[in-house]
Amino acid sequence: MSRRNFHMMVCLILSVLLMTGCWDQRLLKDLRLAFTVAFDLGENDEIVSHIAIRESEKLSVGGQPSQATVAVVEGKGLTLRDTRLSLDKRIPGEFSPSKMRVYLMGEELAKKDIYSILDILYRDPKAPLGAKLAIIEGKAADILQMKSIKETLLTEAVSQLLVNSEKNTIIKNETVQTVCPTMFDPSADFSLPVLKKIETSDIEVIGMGLISDRSYTGITLDDKQSTILLLLANEKDKVAQVNMFVHPEEENLQNRYMTLSVSKAKSHVKATVHSPTDIKVTIDLKITGAIAEYPKNHLVDKKKVKELEEKATQHFLAKSEEVIKIIQDANSDILRIGQHIRVHHNKTWKDIKWREVYPTIEIVPNVTVEITGTGIIN
């Protein structure tokens, strides 16, 4: 054997001895993957968790492909980690939350400190921080027990429903990761989508739940109010359509309304601070859009378009004032006005207790609407 071959043989043997292999492998066949979990408030302030575990049926004799099924398992405990221990005793195999896509919270539990509920997720390296969060009107377990919606597995149905509502500027995309910084920011709040079970086999997004100081206030903006709030917050997504009452004199009900498709919305916040007790905030909102529906006529008259711009401006202004009053009454600073004051008026910020001051400050919206399109007719 040549000297070169001898050296290669020694290196090969040493390499084999030093190879450690996959000591930390987790085989998929040994895991029980959970894709959706529901948290509710139980008796004596216990937390009740229900998880949806996806399983596959074995191949039939005829060789038909397996079908996914969902099993719901319940666990109770004083904390979320305690419920996890309870679930581990009821699940055959190793429970894995790594593929979790949606966390659902019952409204009564959401009125507690949300961070204390989610704390375990920020400490577990396997927890998916990109999973969506939502509040359920009533018990979250009622949604999970449905298992499927319109022949679609529950996880996919809820995820798609939330994504569609985000694209239509009805709710904001909030995940475990995105809400964390805001929960520790005394100058801002956030919102979570609120879902509701309707009839026996369907659910719907009813709007945005207002969060104040890490707790759900119990106040939910409906879908129309939510769209207005997101426009004020510069959070327009792909689509934003607003239906408005413009012709009260018309006998035909359909002819009384117009739908504006918002193509662009830009808002600017300005705060005037004279003293800690004298703060005025103005929000300038400029909306550009096209008429998506106007049953009354074809809109070929520029004078008529100008008139509709004025009516649309009045509509957005009235709705903006309504929404601002609601969020101030709920003491929920979703528009992050506190952040603006902390950055631009830091001296005043240090002298105030924002939770006490925010509901009392004057917030004035200014809205302008420009209609740039009237459809493909003429």
Image (cartoon, rainbow, N blue to C red):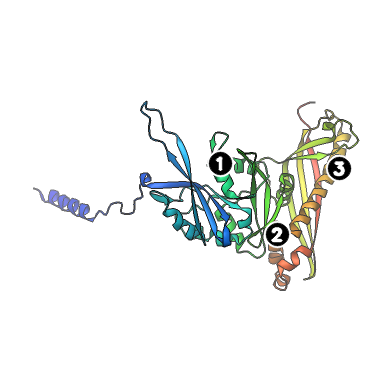
Position of 89 with respect to 149 (left or right) is left
Task: Work out whether 147 lies above or below 80.
Answer: above
| Picture quarter with the C terminus | top right
As measured in the structure, the alpha-carbon distance from the residue carrying label 1 to the one carrying label 2 is 35 Å
Mark 1 crowd level (few <14, some 14–19, many ≥20, 10 Å Cα) = some
Q: Secondary structure at mark 1?
A: loop
Which amino acid lies under the numbered mark 1 shown in the image of this protein? Met
Q: Which residue is mark 1?
A: 146
Work out whether residue 345 can be spotted. Answer: no
As measured in the structure, the alpha-carbon distance from the residue carrying label 1 to the one carrying label 3 is 47 Å
Residue at 56% x, 41% y is 146
Which amino acid lies under the numbered mark 3 shown in the image of this protein? Glu
Residue at 61% x, 43% y is 162
Q: Which residue is mark 3?
A: 310
Where residue 164 appears, as percent x and y from the top left, is: 62, 40
In this view, the residue farthest toward the left is 1
Q: Nearer the viewer, residue 283 or 173?
A: 173
Q: Quadrant of residue 249?
A: top right
Where residue 165 appears, as percent x and y from the top left, is: 64, 42
**Label 2 or label 3, whichever comes before in sequence order:** 3
Q: Which residue is mark 2?
A: 333
